[in-house]
Image (cartoon, rainbow, N blue to C red):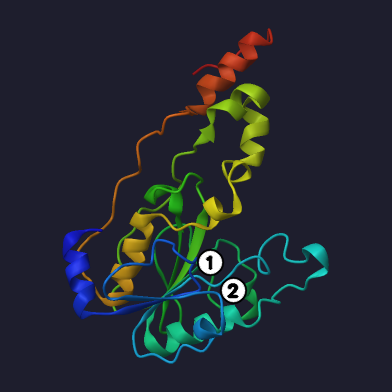
Amino acid sequence: MYAPLAAHLKQHNVAALFVEARGPYFGITGVKPFGFDADARGYMGPWPVVAHPPCARWGSYSNAQGRQTGDDNSCFVCALDAVWRWGGVLEHPAKSKAWVKYGLQKPSPRGWTAAGGAWVCEVEQGHYGHAARKPTWLYAKVKHPLELLWGPSRQRLPHKRLLERGYAASRRGGAVANQSHYQRQLTPFAFRDMLLAMASGFSEDVTVTAPKQRRGEAEPRRVEAASRRSAGVGAPPL
């Protein structure tokens, strides 16, 4: 963690709600993590929060396995109430159906949008180290939201899948299709730090640049060209 932010958190505590056990919010002085249980839903302050309410019942497959959209045991509404009462930031996948359910302002493609005493935005966690682009919506009740890395992050597709299936099929599945549930849900450290900084009122810029290409990843169009050539198909220009 960025050393000045770590020092700041020792004096300006933050509660992390609905976070994975033994995940990136654990073991940080000044951060009190609450898991997916009644403790998180019943949070009564007094610190500002970073909230990651579960998203399965609010996404594209919210009705899967006979479940109902919004059937999340009141996790989202409790997280939203905590942000409104104590300040902080709530994170959910882009296009979350919870925004419509609770009448929240939809964000613009870039930058922060005022939302009746709060702020909303769309940002991709790929800028902050996630293996997928993972577009995300934030709802923040803070005095001064931080400037983030806006727009699309770099597309990173597994080299093996690109060679096996080609670019078009790999792109449809995306990087998320090749990750475990834990990998998909895990918050990158740099993204965590940004959320903690904003919730705690840390005004210094903690934005990071996009991570370098990892081993085993390949630039999609070059692999697409190689796969098309091997199949005897003319490759598009690089």
| Residue topped by disc 1 | 92
Q: Position of residue 132 (x, y in %)?
A: 51, 45
Question: In which image quadrant can residue 196 be found?
Answer: bottom left
Q: Estimate how packed mark 1 is, as few (under 14), some (14 to 19) or many (20 or more) residues with alpha carbons within 10 Å.
A: many
The secondary structure type at the circle numbered 2 is helix
| Residue topped by disc 2 | 99
The Cα–Cα distance between marks 2 and 1, rounded to whole angstroms, is 9 Å
- Badge 2 amino acid: Trp
The secondary structure type at the circle numbered 1 is strand
Closest to the observer, 164 or 225: 164
Give the residue at x 78% y 71%. 67
> In the rendered image of this protein, does residue 143 appear above or below residue 194?
below
The N terminus, quarter of image: bottom left
Give the residue at x 57% y 78%. 76
Q: Position of residue 180 (x, y in %)?
A: 59, 48
Q: Nearer the viewer, mark 2 or mark 1?
A: 1
25 relative to 13 in the view: left or right: right
